[in-house]
Image (cartoon, rainbow, N blue to C red):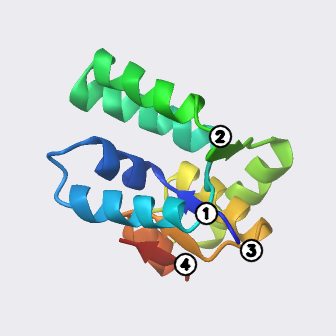
Amino acid sequence: MKPLFVDTAGWMACADAADPAHEAARGARDAALVAGRLLLTTDYVIDETLTLIRMRMGIAATEAWWAQVEGSSRVRHEAIDALRAEKARAVMFRHRDKRYSFTDCTSFVVMKELRLKEALTTDRHFRQMGFRALP
C-alpha cells in the first residue's frame, strides 16, 4: 500500500485544534494509519511545520509535535537533495502563473517520483498539480 504524503498544511490541521480542518484532517490521517499506510513527508515540510507550529502554538507544542513525528515508526521522511531541488526549481519556473512555494514544488517532485497520488493537505496547490487532497 502506498504511503500518504503529508504536507505542512496537513500537519498543521492535525496539530492545531483551532484549524477549521482539524477534525477532518485527523480523521483522514487516522484512517490512513488504520489502513496500514505510512505517512510520508520531506525534510523541507518538517522544517516548515516546525516553524509554523512554533510561531502559532509555541515551543511546547513544537516539541510535542516533533517527539511524536520523530519517534513514530509510521512516519517516514524523504530528503531533498540537490537533484530534487533542481527539479523543484524547474517546476516552479515552469508554472509561472501559480504561486507555488518552493517547498510545495519539492513535495510535488517527491510525490511524482514515488508515484503518490494523495496528500493530506488543505493547500489547493496540490489539487492544481493533479493530486488528490485529503480531507
* Left-right relation of 104 to 93: left
Which amino acid is tagged 1?
Gly
Whole-angstrom CA distance, mark 3 to mark 4, is 10 Å
Q: Position of residue 27 (x, y in %)?
A: 33, 63
Whole-angstrom CA distance, mark 1 to mark 2, is 12 Å
* Left-right relation of 73 to 81: left
Q: Position of residue 100 (x, y in %)?
A: 49, 61
Residue 67 higher or lower than 5, as above or below: above
Can residue 10 be seen here?
A: yes
Q: Residue at x 69, y 57 (%)?
A: 88
Q: Earlier in the sequence, mark 1 or mark 2?
A: 1
Q: Could you tell me if the residues under marks 3 and 1 are in contact, i.e. CB atoms within 8 Å?
A: no
Q: Earlier in the sequence, mark 3 or mark 2?
A: 2
Provide the secondary structure element on which disc 3 rests: loop
Which amino acid is tagged 2?
Ser
Residue 92 higher or lower than 40, as above or below: below
Labels 3, 2: front one: 2
The tag on residue 131 is 4
Which amino acid is tagged 3?
Arg
Q: Earlier in the sequence, mark 3 or mark 4?
A: 3
Labels 3, 1: front one: 1
